[in-house]
Image (cartoon, helix red, strand yellow):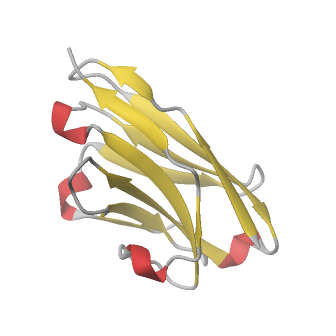
Amino acid sequence: QVQLVESGGGLVQPGGSLRLTCAVSGSNPHFYSMGWFRQAPGKEREGISCIHYGDDSITYAESSKGRFTMSRDRPKNTVYLQMDRLEPEDTAVYYCAALRGLCALVGDFYEYWGQGTQVTVSS
């Protein structure tokens, strides 16, 4: 079992930045790849990025490249999503998720999910 707890969401103006944090605990967390997803009202869940369990290589969705940066701190059992130059279209609930195995940006492959943290980009 893996437990995920997210934090760092909030209200930010367009062009601003936020850093989301996901605390990971449970059995063998280092054997899980970690992903970030988001879901806006009325839209499907969208994959943002995934960091591989075997190393810290990262896969980004094309829409996330350049503005979003994922990282992992293994000693702290924590993953991060740095979001820069945010736009109103980035408003969504952001989730971290755990996948046993290689990275994927498809939510159906993930076994565990956090509760989500709201990110609102508005002036």
Q: Quadrant of residue 36?
A: bottom left
Q: Which residue sits at x=79%, y=75%?
A: 28
Residue 82 horizontal side relative to residue 3, left or right: left
Q: Quadrant of residue 7?
A: top right
Residue 19 coordinates in the image, percent (x, y) = 47, 34
Tell whether 31 sits left or right of 11: right
Q: Residue at x 33, y 20 (%)?
A: 12
Q: Position of residue 13 (x, y in %)?
A: 26, 18
Instruction: Answer above or below: position of 12 versus 45.
Output: above
Q: Residue furthest right?
A: 27
Residue at left offset 35%, top offset 53%: 38
Residue name at image x 17 percent, y 39 percent: 89
Question: Residue 94 location in percent, x, y?
Answer: 42, 47
- In the picture as drawn, the residue positioned furthest to the bottom comes out as 101
| 74, above or below 122, in the image | below
* Residue 55 visible, this orientation: no
Where does residue 96 sit, x and y in percent of width and height? 52, 56
Quadrant of residue 6 within the rendered picture? top right
Quadrant housing the N terminus = bottom right
Residue farthest to the front? 42
The C terminus - image quarter = top left
Residue 58 seen anywhere in this rendered image of the structure: yes
Number of marks drawn: 0
Task: Please tell me whether residue 74 is drawn above or below residue 119 in the rendered image.
Answer: below
Identify which residue, 5 or 68, lies in the foreground.
5
